[in-house]
Image (cartoon, helix red, strand yellow):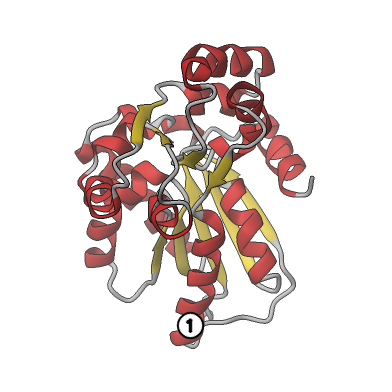
Amino acid sequence: MKKKENIGIFDSGIGGVTVLKEIIKVLPNENYIYYSDSKNNPYGDKTDKEILEICDNIVQMLLNQNCKAIVIACNTASAKAVSFLREKYPEIPFIAIEPAYKMVHDYSYEKPTLVMATKGTIESEKFNLLYHKYDNHKTELLECVGLADIIEAGDNNKIEEYLQNTLGKHKGKIENVVLGCTHYPLVQKEIKKVLGENIKFFNGAPNLAIHLKDVLAKNNLLGNNNGKIYFIDSQGLPSKERRFFDILFK
């Protein structure tokens, strides 16, 4: 039987590159397979049943590619599917991204906070449990409908217009921003332009990377490979691959 040596990572598009960047800092000698599901993007508009089916199909594909652990780099998929996947595949470690709202509680509790996330994430039971447990009572939840799609498309004018229209009213009123979608760190500079230079961002990716390393070590799965990164897009779009690697190594 061939030894499982890859770490699988999947997202509804290329946004999870922001997670992989942090993972590589901690685990540079692992091999990675990144699956960009642009065919089904966005997940936030889909039913729970559809999300479970999509994620299950991706996991089966990644397991067939000799993956020893799987990172769910999509907040919506993490919120909706991780419990189901862990139950169905108990032998595989699943590491799931989640909005870094607890970090606000730990490091910046008194400050007015904006949680930017998809509708699916904000409405999920998993996020609501997290939110009510650590609520600083100075938080606004903002459903950024369509923002991940615009970032995925890479249209800078549309991104700036969207952020101005959506965030402009919060200028001068917010000090913490929780980036509750893996696409959003790609537009941190643009968000700062609208909200102000003193904004403090909270992103779950760095903690996920540390947790992944701990889980691999605990399960005796740490590898010493050559750090290969394979990219698969569900629509087979070369433009996605080029942009993915441009961002990854920028």
Between residue 195 and residue 66, name the one nearer to us: 195
Between residue 184 and residue 218, name the one nearer to us: 184
Q: Crowding at label 1, few (<14), some or many (≥20) Cα neighbours within 10 Å?
A: few
Q: Quadrant of residue 121?
A: top left
Image position, residue 217 (x, y; %): 51, 84
Side of 25 relative to 209 (left or right): right
Residue at the image point whose x is 34% and y is 38% from the top:
138
Residue 67 in sight: no
| Residue 51 drawn above or below residue 10 | above
Residue at the image point whose x is 56% and y is 40% from the top:
15
Q: Residue furthest front?
A: 110
Q: Which residue is mark 1?
A: 1
Side of 155 relative to 177 (left or right): right
Between residue 47 and residue 115, name the one nearer to us: 115
Image position, residue 198 (x, y; %): 63, 37
Q: Secondary structure at mark 1?
A: loop
Q: Quadrant of residue 230?
A: bottom right
Residue at the image point whose x is 52% and y is 37% from the top:
175
Side of 208 relative to 40 (left or right): right
| Residue 86 drawn above or below residue 124 | below
Amino acid type, label 1 = Met
Image position, residue 42 (x, y; %): 41, 30
Residue 207 in sight: yes
Q: Quadrant of residue 142?
A: top left
Image position, residue 40 (x, y; %): 41, 32
Q: Quadrant of the C terminus?
A: top right
